[in-house]
């Protein structure tokens, strides 16, 4: 067996301010609405891809353990996407690790599929544009498209594989926001986002959520460009509430919140009423992402530390995109 090529990439997790929930094309992850996020510096997946001639199957080592079953099947399916694009048949060894808990509201799949895409292409020796890398990463996990470009990133919904891509709207240093993540559960969520996207249309509220998404995205983009925290907080919390309203009214319903989740959300609203630059947003999990300006992060962290039921607190500033190392 011969090694055809090898590369390692690092890709950040990201937190969405305007959420992606529901696809118009399930197989390609072409979403029903555009979304907007920031990359999380220091919370990343690191993935090595080694293309091997004459190997009979793909292999995956995840956080140090040889992995089979569903995780390997998803990685292998994504390698098929890359193989088709690159035009070869070789199998690969994939060695990947995350430095944050998986499946609990910090987008591990986004970082994982962005890193796999960037490393897979580099290991094959082909130089793809950033735009194309975002479209390929998207097929692995929609939000992975947003982990490829740097800083604040918009994913244009589009209506086809080529037109559904992500691009940076502002560099990491444009606005020093911090995501202070209150981890209230390290448990792997019962219903992952892949199933969740499929169920979005079973909620009567999804059509209403989607129809207002472009206006919310425009308001959020403007708030970021103008560094207007009050406007930012309004639209970010509203958009998160809308997504969770869809989740809770889907059939069967999806409740991701735990009791401490709601307590923290209430506190955050109170702190903002006091004048602190902080707002909350939640992904498909119970953990609360408290987005604040850099001068407010220590105060928010200290206040969260005084609360019970929080098992960990992570902080991340705005991060660069994916890169080979
Ligand atoms: O990319 P996925 O399939 O893991 O979906 C991500 C969905 C949310 O995290 C809930 C929202 C988002 O836009 O990141």
Image (cartoon, rainbow, N blue to C red):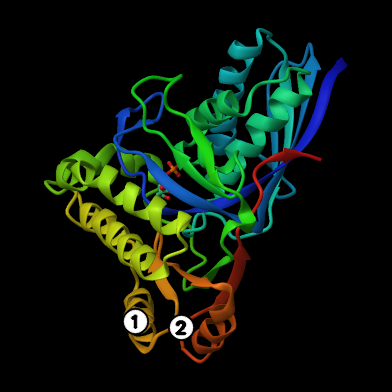
Instruction: Pick whichever of labels 2 and 1 is earlier in the sequence.
Output: 1
Frontmost residue, 293 versus 186: 293
Is residue 94 visible in this depiction of the protein? Answer: yes
Identify the residue at image location x=54%, y=86%: 299
Residue to which mark 2 is pinned: 309
Frontmost residue, 70 versus 273: 273
x, y percent for residue 133: 60, 27
x, y percent for residue 27: 39, 24
Residue at the outermost bottom position: 306
Residue at the outermost front position: 226
239 relative to 251, above or below: below
Are the residues flagged by discs 2 and 1 in contact, CB closer than 8 Å?
A: yes
Q: Nearer the viewer, mark 2 or mark 1?
A: 1
| SS label for mark 1 | helix
297 relative to 52, above or below: below
119 relative to 304, above or below: above
Q: Is residue 205 left or right of residue 175?
A: left
Q: Is residue 115 left or right of residue 192?
A: right
x, y percent for residue 184: 47, 73
Identify the residue at image location x=43%, y=20%: 161
Identify the residue at image location x=58%, y=18%: 80
Which picture quadrant has residue 174?
bottom right
Identify the residue at image location x=58%, y=79%: 295
Residue to which mark 1 is pinned: 263
């Amino acid at each position: 067996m011969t090694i055809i090529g090898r590369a390692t990439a690092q890709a950040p997790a990201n937190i969405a301010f305007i959420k992606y929930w529901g696809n118009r094309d399930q197989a390609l992850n072409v979403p029903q609405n555009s979304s907007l996020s920031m990359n999380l510096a220091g919370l990343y997946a690191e993935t090595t891809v080694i293309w091997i001639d004459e190997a009979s199957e793909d292999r995956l080592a995840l956080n140090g353990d040889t992995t089979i079953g569903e995780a390997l099947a998803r990685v292998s399916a994504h390698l098929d996407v890359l193989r088709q694009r690159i035009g070869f048949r070789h199998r690969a060894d994939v060695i990947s690790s995350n430095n944050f808990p998986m499946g609990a509201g910090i987008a591990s799949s986004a970082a994982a599929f962005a890193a796999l895409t960037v490393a897979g292409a580099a290991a094959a020796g082909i130089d793809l544009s950033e735009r194309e890398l975002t479209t390929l990463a998207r097929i692995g996990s929609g939000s992975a498209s947003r982990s490829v470009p740097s800083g604040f990133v918009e994913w244009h919904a589009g209506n086809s594989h080529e037109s559904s891509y992500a691009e940076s709207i502002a560099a990491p240093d444009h606005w020093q926001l911090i995501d202070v993540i209150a981890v209230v559960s390290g448990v792997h969520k019962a219903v992952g986002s892949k199933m969740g996207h499929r169920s979005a249309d079973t909620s009567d509220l999804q059509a209403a959520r989607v129809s207002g998404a472009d206006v919310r995205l425009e308001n959020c983009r403007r708030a970021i460009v103008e560094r207007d925290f009050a406007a930012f907080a309004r639209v970010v919390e509203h958009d998160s509430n809308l997504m969770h309203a869809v989740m809770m009214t889907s059939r069967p319903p999806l409740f991701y919140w735990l009791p401490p989740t709601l307590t923290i959300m209430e506190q955050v609203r109170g702190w903002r009423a006091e004048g602190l630059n902080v707002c909350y947003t939640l992904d498909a999990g119970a953990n609360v992402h408290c987005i604040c300006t850099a001068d407010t992060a220590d105060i928010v962290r200290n206040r969260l530390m005084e609360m019970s039921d929080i098992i960990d607190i992570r902080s991340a500033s705005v991060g660069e995109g994916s890169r080979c190392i």
